[in-house]
Amino acid sequence: MDITNIAAINRLEDVSRYQSVNPMTQASENEGTASFDNLLNSAMKLVNQTEDYSNKAEVEEIKYAMGQSDSLHDLMIAQQKANVSLQYTVAVKNTAIEAYKTLMNLQF
């Protein structure tokens, strides 16, 4: 199992705004582990936040193109937030798929 991807995501969590929605920190109080429901809800929140950032970046692009906004700074910030959010979402997805593939390849 390649753990370099997992280590990269752990470093992202230290500086990420998504640290509060990390499914492993939302552990079930009774079991001490994250339930699948918490994991799925957290992933959906992450996707929704990514979509919101993408929509905000698109609105800023339209405002700038139509001359309603002169602030290139706001446009660049919105685009960068959308880009970073998308990269983080893809990294989480890739890690989940890699974990699934590893589990499926286990032989009992």
Image (spheres, rainbow, N blue to C red):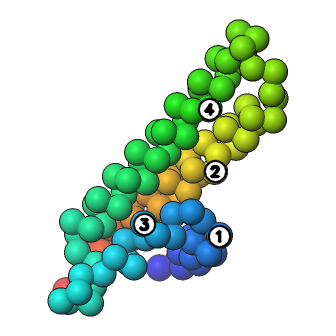
**What residue is pinned by disc 4?**
57
Label 4, label 2: how many angstroms apart (C-alpha)?
Answer: 12 Å
Q: Say which of 40 and 96 sits in front.
A: 40
- 47 shown above or below 4: above
Horizontal arrangement in the rendering, residue 86 relative to residue 104 (left or right): right
Q: Amino acid at mark 1?
A: Val
Crowdedness of circle 1 by 10 Å Cα count: few (<14), some, many (20+)? few
Q: Secondary structure at mark 4?
A: helix
Residue depicted at 56% across the width and 57% down the height: 88
Work out whether 103 lies above or below 65: below
Find residue 66 and report its horizontal and vertical position in percent.
71, 9
To which quarter of the image does residue 38 belong? bottom left
Find residue 21 and name its label. 3
- Rendering coords of residue 36 (x, y %): 23, 69
Q: Residues within 10 Å of mark 2 (few under 14, many from 20)?
A: some
**Cβ atoms under marks 4 and 3 closer than 8 Å:** no
State how far apart marks 3 and 2 are (Cα). 16 Å
Closer to the chain start, of discs 3 and 2, is 3
- Disc assigned to residue 15: 1
In the image, what residue type sits under mark 2?
A: Val
Asked if marks 1 and 2 touch (Cβ < 8 Å), the reply is no
Question: Which amino acid does the dot numbered 3 rest on?
Answer: Val
Helix, strand, or loop for circle 3?
Answer: helix
* Quarter of the image where one finds residue 25: bottom left
Q: Which residue is mark 2?
A: 84
- SS under mark 2: helix
In the rendered image, residue 74, in percent from the top left (x then y), is placed at 74, 35
Image position, residue 57 (x, y; %) = 62, 32
- Using the image, determine if residue 44 lies above or below residue 17: above
The C terminus: image quadrant: bottom left
